[in-house]
Structures are given as structure tokens and as C-alpha cells.
Image: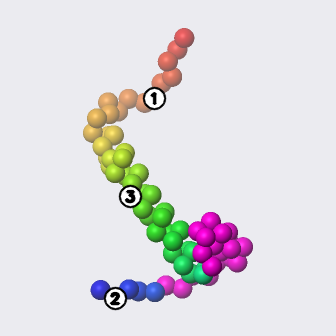
Amino acid sequence: MANAQVTVTLDAHLVIEVMVMSGTRNPQDAVELICRDYLERGQRTEARTGDADDGKRVSDDQPYRAQEG
């Protein structure tokens, strides 16, 4: 499968912030690094917390009530 390319127009100030955060001098590389990091963080979080449906399986479906007293 060939890599597809997408062109996205972003605000220059936003891209400069991304370049500073990622430590790169190339705007395209900076945005790509931030996107890849974002995706990896999501996968790590999902691996630690499990699937969103897992909570429904073990829940008693009672609405949350603050304890009195």
C-alpha cells in the first residue's frame, strides 16, 4: 500500500508552536510527529484502561449518588 499524502492548511502561529514543542525545523515533520504522538498516547491509554464497553459489563447501571453524611 502506497503512502497517501494530504495537504492541510494551518495557522502559522499554531505550526510554529508545534515546531517548538517537537524540536523540529520542518513544519511538515513537526505536525507529523505531533499527530503520531497523539495516536500513540491514545493506544497506550486504551491498553491501560480497556475498552469503553468494559465498564458497562461490570456496572450495576445505577446512577451515581453522592454519599450522605
Mark 2 Cα-neighbour bin, 10 Å: few <14, some 14–19, many ≥20: few
Circle nearer the N terminus (1, 3): 3
From where the camera sits, is residue 67 visible? yes
Q: Which residue is mark 2?
A: 2
Residue 43 sits above or below residue 23 on the image: above
Q: Which residue is mark 3?
A: 43
Q: Position of residue 33 (x, y in %)?
A: 51, 71
> At 54% across and 11% down in the image, what residue appears?
69
Mark 1 Cα-neighbour bin, 10 Å: few <14, some 14–19, many ≥20: few
Give the mark count: 3
Mark number displayed over residue 15:
none
Q: Amino acid at mark 1?
A: Tyr
Q: Give the residues drawn in magenta, as a range.
A: 6-25
> At 33% across and 47% down in the image, what residue appears?
50
Cα distance in 3D space between marks 1 and 3: 28 Å
Residue 7 falls within the magenta-colored stretch: yes
Circle nearer the N terminus (3, 2): 2
The figure's colour scheme reads rainbow
